[in-house]
Image (spheres, coloured by chain):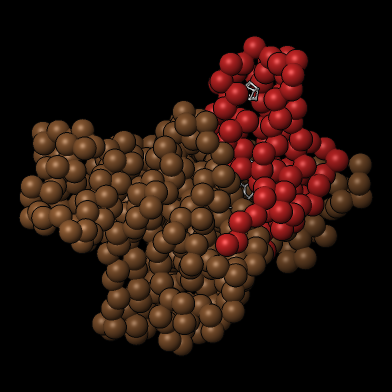
Chain colours: A brown, B red
Amino acid sequence: MSPDHSRSFVTAASDMTTPPDEHFDVIVVGAGPAGSAAALVAARAGLKVLLVERGEYPGAKNVSGACFYGSAVLNELIPNWWEKAPVERYVCRRDLVLMSETTAVSMDFRSAAAGYVEPPYNAFTILRPKFDRWFAAQAEAAGAFLLTSTVVDDVIKERGRVVGIKVRREHGEVRGDVVIACDGVNSWLAKKAGLQRDLHDHEVSLGVKEVLGLDEAVIRERFHLTGNEGVAYEYVGAVTQDVRGGAFLYTNKSSLSVGIIGQVSSLVEAKKRPYDILEHFKSHPAVAPLVRGGKLREYSAHLIPEAGWKMMPQLVAPGMLIAGDAAGFCLATGLYIEGINYAMQSGIAAAKAAIHACACRDFGKHTLARYTELLWPHNVFTDFRAFKHAPGFVNGNRLQNLYPDLVAHGTEMLFQVNGQAKQKILPLSFKVMRQYKVKSRHVLSDLYKVARAYLW
Amino acid sequence: MVMTTHEEKMHTTRFRVDDKPHIVVDPDKCKTCSVRACVYVCPANLFVPLGDGSVLFNYEQCFECGTCFIVCSKEGALRWDYPDGGYGVTFRES
Ligand SMILES: Cc1cc2nc3c(=O)[nH]c(=O)nc-3n(C[C@H](O)[C@H](O)[C@H](O)COP(=O)(O)OP(=O)(O)OC[C@H]3O[C@@H](n4cnc5c(N)ncnc54)[C@H](O)[C@@H]3O)c2cc1C
Ligand code: SF4
Ligand code: SF4
């Protein structure tokens, strides 16, 4: 055994000086955005908080695209946070691109409206290992104890109630009144506590990503940006070949984040390797000029819980709450992928419920159920219910692979001037639909589904 | 163009390898598996099908994403856990 295995509890974490047998009010597992938000809020309320992370540092195990839409949420916790945090660029441009193998049709949105270009801004691009480290340090500054390089293996249950955690080390038991599981998409803690089942392969998507180093001046010029402006591109269609999913490209300060996301069951069916799809994506004529000259800095991969409302575990048990990706709070609607904001919002709601339970000294299910009530005003349930039809619809084959191709091809024909008679849009549409063997009734039923998913 | 091979990609990611494997595959069970989903989905390409019908697995450059665990349909073929604290993959940029 290497000496590292026998590190004592105290020396394991440079940040931690508390002996293991101490009792905490709140134990938070996982120092991602959900865990750090929960720890920050609980610590500020004067509670004794332990934040446990298995990575060498918070963010060491974490991957997002990452376009962070929760700027205003975080601004309430830490005013003008972007002046202190390691952010890359604020996002004032979004580009939604439909693709066929040869063509791309995009809706390029740019705004100089206050909501986008002024504090607290609409969104920022970030890099998780840097951002998460900073965010966890804010929780520490508020008084939480951060314990890194420590795996939590299980919960301790007594008389049906969770009363602490088991960490992977000798004598590794830590007790606390409320355990908040913020351990991400593969939440072993939620499973061990009996609150979540094994996930199915159609409920999760695999994201693979590259960070490509590129000169700041080149990024500004290439993407038509000034100063610290940034752009978020999202792609659907042939770009993921037969796999249901999408792709993204985000501008950082001096790098690009480029990745593809594929539904796991669909990767298996198509027998496609995710990194091959990524290469295929980068070679698309609409993407290649954007990534040209980029120098690979890091390759990464991570799972995303995408089924939303339908895969939500039991969120509350006596002595325990579940937040963030562990609870499936990642919204993938095809128009965007948002998880960091919901992780923070649910983390905050969980902390508030824990504070309430500590105040009444009652950690039973009924008292902690305040958490689920708070998920409405914190806009987690609100959004997931509103978009509950979107994930299933987004993963439909026609929307995923057929329509983007069809629209791209139709637009191609619309714009081509080749000496033949021009056609008006409706006859052209029918012609393209015939070519793609799409039936009008399918289009109508899909339009209805689009409307149900996004309009009302 | 910025095309990279899978080897080049893996080269950029940092791993602190533990001597103890955190994922263990039972090659006998794999011999009877017809799906071999792990081979396609693993973003690190750590599952290699062998001529004798078994699958060779190497845990060292694992992203700890959990995909193989989710797709493996053979009961008991794959024992999956996180590596010990501080070991395994460490992202610096992503
Ligand atoms: C490729 C990709 C692109 C994405 N793009 C975006 C995007 O652009 N915008 C967006 O908002 N969201 C995006 N998401 C989703 C977003 O990453 C997640 O929703 C978000 O990270 C969830 O935060 P969390 O705190 O719940 O979980 P995580 O960020 O996963 O954090 C969980 C933490 O718990 C730790 N942990 C796990 N198990 C244990 C244990 N047993 N013991 C101790 N510690 C443990 C982990 O190391 C980790 O630090 C993307 C996801 C992926 C994979
Ligand atoms: S899917 Fe499971 S049983 Fe099949 S080859 Fe892979 S690890 Fe073995
Ligand atoms: S956890 Fe992910 S990276 Fe590791 S072996 Fe399984 S699929 Fe591959």
Residue at left offset 79%, top offset 52%: B16
Q: Residue furthest front?
A: A419
Q: Position of residue A162 (x, y in %)?
A: 55, 40
Say whether residue A395 is visible: yes
Number of numbered markers = 0
Q: Position of residue A2 (x, y in %)?
A: 91, 46
Q: Is residue A3 left or right of residue A85?
A: right
Q: Is residue A60 left or right of residue B86?
A: left
Residue at left offset 42%, top offset 61%: A286
Say whether residue A138 is visible: no
Q: Which part of the image, by quadrant, shows the N terminus of chain B?
A: bottom right
**Quarter assignment of residue A211:** bottom right
Residue at left offset 53%, top offset 80%: A218
Q: Residue furthest bottom?
A: A227
Residue at left offset 27%, top offset 38%: A398
Please state which of residues A439 and A427 is positioned toward the viewer in this rendering. Answer: A427
Q: Is residue A393 left or right of residue A299?
A: left
Q: Position of residue A54 (x, y in %)?
A: 68, 51
Please state which of residues A313 and A154 is positioned toward the viewer in this rendering. Answer: A313
Taking B88 as reference, is B28 above or below it? above
Q: Which part of the image, by quadrant, shows the C terminus of chain B?
A: bottom right
Taking B50 as reference, is A171 above or below it? below
Please state which of residues A42 and B77 is positioned toward the viewer in this rendering. Answer: B77
Q: Position of residue B14 (x, y in %)?
A: 74, 56
